[in-house]
Amino acid sequence: MRFSDETEARLERLMAGCPPGNKRSALVPMLLFIQDEVGAVTPEVVQEVCSRLEVSPLEVEEVVSYYSMLRRQPAGRYHLQICTNISCMLVGGAELFEHACRKLGIGHRGVTEDGLFSLEEVECIGACCWAPALIVNYDYHHNVTPEAFDRLIEQLRRHDSSSGER
């Protein structure tokens, strides 16, 4: 399996930084880099990672099943992760998540029919001082109200339709 030149370069740098005799230390970041390109950790990805790191499929499967940020199914173009841990919950994080479910018509780990949005309820994202918080792909959004969420969704829809990407 071959990835884009950019991903291949990232994987090469990652492998170069591994301690001698410990390629396995690259497992989680390698899976994340590949997931960013492919969209999910597929059986083909598992096999490729096994061959590059000289680990067993079971070792990869254990990691994929443990870390919630690793996905078996592709996420939407805009993957929304809403924190509902204690700090966010105390200032409306759970209500924000419920609002997002209604607005997008999907639930936890759901993907909209058009593939534009996916939604995930997550534990702490390290933005407690700015709660409630959410992440869209790798971009943080702080002090998010339901109204701000609606504006964000409309902005992402406009960006997607104006960029011509799909």
Image: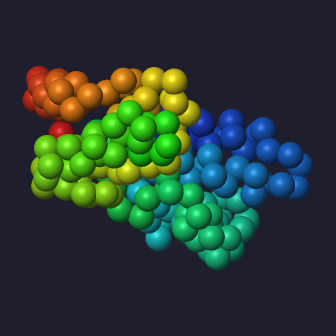
Q: Is residue 119 visible?
A: yes
Q: Position of residue 85 (x, y in %)?
A: 48, 45
Determine the residue positioned at 59% across, 64% down.
66
Q: Quadrant of residue 96?
A: top left
Q: Nearer the viewer, residue 112 or 127?
A: 127
Colour mapping used in the image: rainbow
Q: Quadrant of residue 156?
A: top left
Query: Relative to residue 48, is residue 56 drawn left or right?
Result: right
Q: Position of residue 132 (x, y in %)?
A: 39, 32
Query: Relative to residue 120, is residue 112 drawn left or right?
Result: left
Determine the residue positioned at 50% across, 43% down.
86
Q: Quadrant of the C terminus?
A: top left
Q: Nearer the viewer, residue 48 or 121?
A: 121
Q: Position of residue 118 (x, y in %)?
A: 27, 49
Q: Nearer the viewer, residue 137 or 151?
A: 151
Above or below: residue 103 compared with residue 70: above
Q: Position of residue 28 (x, y in %)?
A: 63, 52
Instruction: State the residue lying farthest toward the bottom.
Output: 58
